[in-house]
Amino acid sequence: MSDVNERRLGLAIEALRAGRVIPYLGPDALSLEPEAPVPATPQALAEFLTARVAVPYKIRKRLTQAAQFIENFKHRKTLVTAMNAAFAATPEPCELHWAIASSGAPLIVDVWYDDSMLAALRTELGDCGWGQIQGLSQSEHPGAWTGCFDAHGAAASGVDPNWHTLLYRPLGGRSPAGNYLVSDSDFVEVLTEIDIQTPIPPVVQALRRGRHFLFLGCRFNDQLTRSFARQICKRSSDLHWAVLPEEPTRMEARFLEEEHIERIAMPLGAVAAQLNAAVVRPKMAV
């Protein structure tokens, strides 16, 4: 099995270096930074929010439901303020973030709210040649599904054709404007339209065409994460990879099979080390 894993990882790295892979980064990436000063799982985030705002006991560990309760009974601004507090600190980027930032990937997907990936891009790529798109909550931005920001964090009217790397944060993020998809109603709005791809930016749809996805720090053990991953990688290539050191659940295994995702059963830290060794950072190129 180890030979299979090494072969799959080798193929993924080869494709990454050729610009044919889209890294897809989940919250478990923060497991490589044990002292990360932000919530590193949905449950930890739910516990952070409910420590600040009282919610019914039965939903205290259910992130989207707890966020919805806060939004309904304490106002959306209270929820956003609590989210900003949860992710106020930026964790030091880990080896995985540096590898992705250095890879030259034209599109990077980040599905957690912390700014680690953003910090790595700022260090590696500087203040030009890249930007980000964030998902927007319909409760705050009715009719607008995404917001676009340049490397300085200034709002942009669209993607600059001179951007060589685009960071796509479908759930939003702390920087620069505190945009978050986190409550039940946030996700209901998006999931109602996502099958017809309305919330997926056209530039993301174009960049994914013919490319593979490499899922890093992701689990697919709930319907929400599976739905986002399925729709974001729709109409791309017919081969992807996911680093999953733990044995997948029955639903995860089914999802991997349906979406043509090959499992790489290796520790995330070991994969990060190999990725980091394989890429040449732009600032070191000659």
Image (spheres, grey):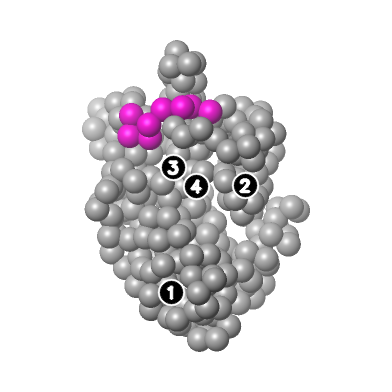
Residue at left 69%, top 59%? Answer: 191
Query: In front: 208, or 125?
Result: 208
Q: Residue furthest top?
A: 3
Q: Which tag is nearer the camera, tag 2 or tag 1? A: 1
Mark 2 → mark 4, Cα distance in angstroms: 14 Å
Label 2's element? helix
On the image, the x and y values in percent for residue 94 come to: 28, 44
Give the residues drawn in magenta, as a range.
263-270
Q: Which residue is mark 1?
A: 50
Residue at left 54%, top 71%? Answer: 58
Q: Which residue is mark 4?
A: 109
Looking at numbered disc 2 in the image, what kind of residue is underneath it? Arg
Looking at numbered disc 4 in the image, what kind of residue is underneath it? Val
CB contact under 8 Å: marks 1 and 4? no
Residue at left 55%, top 35%? Answer: 248
Return the disc, 1 or 4, that comes first in the chain's sequence. Answer: 1
Q: Which residue is mark 3?
A: 217
Q: Which residue is mark 2?
A: 226
Characterize the local packing of mark 3: few (<14), some (14-19) or many (20 or more) Cα atoms within 10 angstroms.
many
On the image, the x and y values in percent for residue 26 come to: 46, 47
Looking at numbered disc 1 in the image, what kind of residue is underneath it? Thr
Mark 3 → mark 2, Cα distance in angstroms: 14 Å
Mark 1 → mark 4, Cα distance in angstroms: 28 Å
Looking at numbered disc 3 in the image, what kind of residue is underneath it? Gly
Q: Which tag is nearer the camera, tag 1 or tag 4? A: 1
Is residue 236 part of the magenta span, yes or no? Answer: no
On the image, the x and y values in percent for residue 44 come to: 40, 61
